[in-house]
Image (cartoon, rainbow, N blue to C red):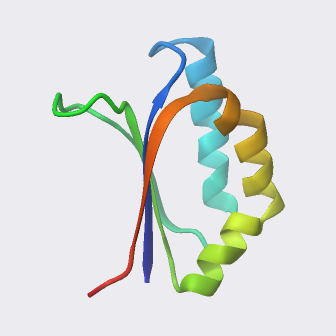
Amino acid sequence: MIQHTVVLKLKYPKGSPEEKEFLSAVAELAMIPGVLNFQSLRQIGKKNDFDYCLSMEFENMTAYEAYNAHPDHTRFVTTYWAKYVEKFLELDYAPI
């Protein structure tokens, strides 16, 4: 099992039309084959300045790599990620 997590901060304020558009596009990632247990989360703590977390699982590295190469994912990255995200931290884990 691969746990893929990304925490991020948008360039646009909370409640903005851009935030809504980005989060709507994010939700579509759950439909890509191989994505399991997709979650889109809003940060409520004050220990960092990231605003959102995207979390999903993949059965194995092959499924994860297929997701990364999937046309819907690459289109999301070029259309939304590059234009809307100010900063991020990507974390990928496998069980010990």
> In this rendering, would 25 be left or right of 16?
right
Quarter of the picture containing the C terminus is: bottom left
Q: Residue at x 67, y 60 (%)?
A: 31
The residue nearer to you, when weighing 85 against 55, is: 85
> Could you tell me residue 26's position as x and y percent?
60, 43
> Could you tell me residue 12's position as x and y percent?
54, 15
Q: Residue at x 18, y 32 (%)?
A: 45
> In this rendering, would 12 be left or right of 70?
left
For residue 84, what is the image quadrant? top right
> Could you tell me residue 73's position as x and y percent?
72, 55
Total marks drawn? 0
The residue nearer to you, when weighing 36 against 79, is: 79
Quarter of the picture containing the N terminus is: bottom left
Q: Is residue 33 visible?
A: no
Q: Is residue 55 visible?
A: yes
For residue 18, what is the image quadrant? top right
Q: Residue at x 76, y 67 (%)?
A: 69
The residue nearer to you, when weighing 32 against 91, is: 91
Relative height, residue 54 to residue 48 (above, below) = below
Relative height, residue 83 to residue 67 (above, below) = above
Q: Residue at x 62, y 14 (%)?
A: 17
> Could you tell me residue 55's position as x and y percent?
43, 57
For residue 21, what is the image quadrant? top right
Relative height, residue 72 to residue 40 (above, below) = below
> In this rendering, would 67 be left or right of 88?
right
